[in-house]
Image (cartoon, rainbow, N blue to C red):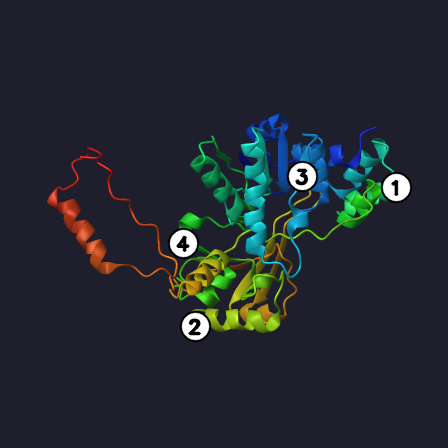
Amino acid sequence: MCVGTGMTLGSHLTPLARSQIEQADVVFALVPDRIAEMWLERMNPDVRSLQPYYQDGKSRMSTYRLWVELLLTEVRAGKRVCGVFYGHPGIFAWSPHKAIEAARAEGFQAHMEPGISAEDCLYADLGIDPGRYGCQHFEASQLLIYERVIDPTGYLVLWQVVLVGDMSLKRFATGPAYRQLLVDVLSRDYPLEHDIILYRAPTLPVQQAQISHIVLAELPQAKLSEEMTVVLPPMAALKPNVAMRKRLEDLDQSGAFDGKQNS
Amino acid sequence: MTDAIDLLERIGRDANLRYAATDELALLLSRAGLSEACQAAVISADMSLLAGELGETATPIFHHSINPGHEEQQQEKREDEDQEEQHEPQPDQPRPASD
């Protein structure tokens, strides 16, 4: 079982996720800070932090694989295991998906319970409805390493910008020169003076969301933390698809819609 | 005595407390019997200070990157290179019907 705590201590944990934590034989936890770990320890006496497996100079991918193996080892031993991840356990998180996939492949029952993600908080705190203009999400490095197509008529949300371009897989931050490459890519679709938003969801209930505005050109020198997300609002109006609108009108006029769904 | 963790959870799930003014929270913490240092740590959301007040001797830096993004592909690429082949990630393809 993998569950999410949500982002904010005490505010987001679902009743079902809490029950899963309380009823587990062993809990593996990856949460924002030691305070959140201590909070989980109130719910279960056997909470094991996954944080110590991160090490400078060690491939993060190796760490993610190790986490999966830690969970599976206890599952194979017949334990009821709960992996607890902050936010949503399946959003921008590799290990929970892999752990569930691996457990199922070995014949065990495995399930993921959703949690309130940083993305959910972002929509609420920034007043963004992704249905209005559309919204693309990328792990920031993907924009450098792959040829991705950005649609500047919708929102663009970039995750893990602080370590953008880390090909070593071993660092937890890169720096201004790497972020300048990201700006170079983004400047193909956005002007350098485009207003962008730096966002961090609150993890303690005495905090509020951190929201600041800068222009794109300032991103390389901006003060960013690991958990900060960069949002680029749309810079161009949606372009009507005239040809398809005409085809839709023709369909309507032809009587193709008879009022019965799925017919 | 209610401690800081219990109070944080209570603040997190109480509609009146979650967005309460600082002086209201300070009153709550004071009435709960928290030390002045612990009150200050909670109000300022200072993780290191708070952990210290809760008896933690070490407050490690917590990393937040749990998404490999390109890393899985990088790893696969390296494995492929070992086999003198290279594969970029492909979108999931529909599986052929088994019957």
Instruction: Pinpoint the chain carrying mark 4.
Output: A
Which amino acid is tagged 4? Tyr
Name the residue: 78% across, 36% down.
B4
Instruction: Farthest residue to the front: give it.
Output: B83
> Mark 1, mark 4: which one is toward the viewer?
1
Pointer 4 or 2: first along the chain: 4
Name the residue: 70% across, 36% down.
A39
Q: Position of residue A231 (x, y in %)?
A: 52, 58
Q: How many marks?
A: 4
Q: Is residue A126 left or right of residue B56?
A: left
Which amino acid is tagged 3? Arg
**How far separated are the C-alphas under marks 1 and 2?**
53 Å
Instruction: Farthest residue to the left: give it.
Output: A254
> Mark 3, mark 1: which one is toward the viewer?
3
Q: B1 or A22, which lies in front?
A: A22
**Residue matched to label 4:** A133
Q: Quadrant of residue A84?
A: top right
**Residue matched to label 1:** B36
**How far separated are the C-alphas under marks 4 and 2?**
20 Å
Residue A14, visible in the rendered structure: no
**How far separated are the C-alphas under marks 3 and 1?**
31 Å
**Residue matched to label 3:** A48
Q: Is residue A198 left or right of residue B62?
A: left
Q: Is residue A132 left or right of residue A72?
A: left
**How far separated are the C-alphas under marks 3 and 4?**
42 Å
Q: Position of residue A89 (x, y in %)?
A: 53, 42
Which amino acid is tagged 1? Glu
Name the residue: 63% across, 49% down.
A209
